[in-house]
């Protein structure tokens, strides 16, 4: 497993968690503080 695989897995997990826990504020790879 490469670090890229790990990062993608983490991103996916965080995305799923975000959609399930914060459906009013989905975060899709736009981490610019908004």
Image: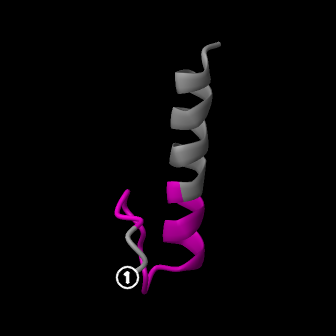
Q: Which residue is mark 1?
A: 34
10 is higher (above) or lower (below) than 19: above
Residue sitting at the far top: 1
Q: In which quarter of the view is residue 29 placed?
A: bottom left
Residue sitting at x 53%, y 46%: 11
Residue sitting at the far bottom: 24
Give the camera-side residue of 21 and 8.
Answer: 8
Residue 3 on image: x %, y %: 61, 23
28 is higher (above) or lower (below) than 24: above
Q: Which residues are magenta?
A: 15-31
Give the camera-side residue of 24 and 1.
Answer: 1
Residue 19 on image: x %, y %: 49, 68
Pointer 1 local density, CA inside 10 Å: few below 14, some 14–19, many at least 20: few
In this rendering, would 1 be left or right of 15? right
Residue sitting at x 37%, y 82%: 34
Residue sitting at x 37%, y 61%: 28
Provide the secondary structure element on which disc 1 rests.
Answer: loop
22 is higher (above) or lower (below) than 32: below
């Amino acid at each position: 497993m490469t670090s890229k695989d790990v990062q993608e897995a983490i991103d996916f997990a965080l995305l799923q968690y975000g959609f399930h826990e914060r459906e009013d504020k989905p975060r899709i790879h736009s981490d610019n503080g908004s």
